[in-house]
Amino acid sequence: MDYREKIDPKKLPRHIAIIMDGNGRWAKQQGFLRVKGHEKGTKSVRDVTEAAAELGIENLTLYAFSTENWNRPKLEVKTLMKLLVSSLRKEITTLQKNDIKLNAIGDLNSLPQNVKHELEEVIEKTKQNKRLVVSLALSYGSRQELTNAAKEIGLKVKKGELTPESIDESVINQHLYTRNFPDVDLLIRTSGEQRISNFLLWQIAYAELYFTNTLWPDYRKEDLFEAIYNYQNRERRFGKTSEQLS
Ligand code: IPE
Ligand code: IPE
Ligand code: MG
C-alpha cells in the first residue's frame, strides 16, 4: 500500500517522537558488531528527517542516547559519540538545503567536549531554518528533566520570583528542555520493545503510541508514512466521549 498518498495533509501530527531502537539486534542478525548497527541507523535518521520535512511535520524528536546508555560498554559509548560528531558534520548541508533547524535536549554538559562543540555549531548554523525542527535527545532522561525542573522552580520560589500557588502545568512545561514545543502527538518505537525507557514522560501524556517490529537500521520513509496513516485513523478523545467529538 502507498501510505504517502493516503495521508491527510490537514491532520498531520505536529510533533512526532521516535525511540530509535534495535541497532544492536540488527547488527547481530547480520553477523556484525553492534556498532555497525549504529552506523547503519544514521541512514534511517536521514530518511525519516527528510520524510518529515517533505510532509510538513513541524517537530521531530529523536531519542539517540539515554542517561542510562552511559552504562553500556565503554567502547560502544565512545563509538556512538564519534558517530554523532561525524554525522553532524556530514548532515549540515542537508539540513541547510531542507531548511531544517537542529535542536538538542538532554544533559548536554555531560557530553564529551568535541561532541558538545559540534552540536552547538550545527545548532547555531541552522537556527534560522523554519521548515522542521529536529531535536536530538542526547544524554536524555525524562526523570532527570523533571527533577531539574522541580529544582529550578524551587529556587525561583526561594528567591521570591514565583509563588507556590502560581505553579501550574504551564510553569512546569516552561522548565523542561522541550519548552516552546507542542506536546507529542505520535510516539513511535521500533524493534518490537513496548516500553518508554524514560523518554518524554510528561510530554507524551496524551500521545498516540505506535510500536513496530522493524529494527531501526531497516526503518525507511515508507515506515514513517505508515505510522502517520495509522495515527490518522485513530480517534483521539482526550477524555471525552466519541459522540462529543462528532
Ligand atoms: C538503539 O539501538 C540505539 C541506542 C540505544 C543508542 P540499541 O543499541 O539499543 O539496539 P538493541 O536494542 O540492542 O538491539
Ligand atoms: C532507548 O533504547 C534509548 C534510545 C533509543 C536511545 P534502549 O535500548 O537503551 O532501551 P532499553 O534499555 O532496552 O529499554
Ligand atoms: Mg535497545
Image (cartoon, rainbow, N blue to C red):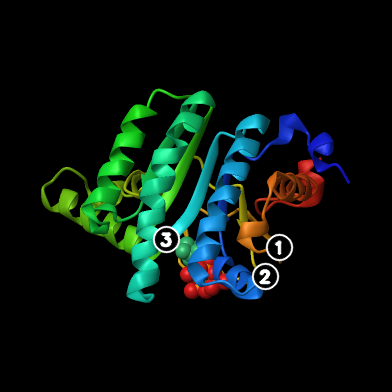
Mark 1 and mark 2 residues within 8 Å of each other at the beta carbon: yes
Q: Residues within 10 Å of mark 2 (few under 14, many from 20)?
A: few
- Secondary structure under tag 2 reads loop
Residue 151 position within the rendered picture, expressed as x and y whole percent measured from the top left: 22, 58
Q: Residue at x 33, y 64 (%)?
A: 78
Residue 115 position within the rendered picture, expressed as x and y whole percent measured from the top left: 29, 50
- Secondary structure under tag 3 reads strand
The vertical placement of 10 against 225, above or below, is above
Total numbered labels: 3
Q: Residues within 10 Å of mark 3 (few under 14, many from 20)?
A: many
In the image, 219 versus 137, the foreground residue is 219
* Residue labelled 2 has its Cβ within 8 Å of some atom of ligand 1: no
Q: Residue at x 34, y 45 (%)?
A: 171
In which quadrant is the C terminus drawn?
top right
Relative to 90, is 246 on the left or the right?
right
Mark 2 and mark 3: span between their CA atoms? 18 Å
The picture quadrant where one finds residue 129 is: top left
Residue at image mark 2? 192
Relative to 225, is 47 on the left or the right?
left
Residue at image mark 3? 65
- Answer yes or no: is residue 61 visible: yes
Mark 1 and mark 3: span between their CA atoms? 20 Å
What is the residue that sits farthest to the right in this orientation? 1
Q: Amino acid at mark 2?
A: Gly
Q: Residue at x 60, y 75 (%)?
A: 28
Mark 1 and mark 2: span between their CA atoms? 5 Å
* Residue labelled 3 has its Cβ within 8 Å of some atom of ligand 2: yes
In the image, 127 versus 169, the foreground residue is 127
What is the residue that sits farthest to the left in this orientation? 159
Residue at image mark 1? 212
Relative to 11, is 82 on the left or the right?
left
Q: Residues within 10 Å of mark 1 (few under 14, many from 20)?
A: some
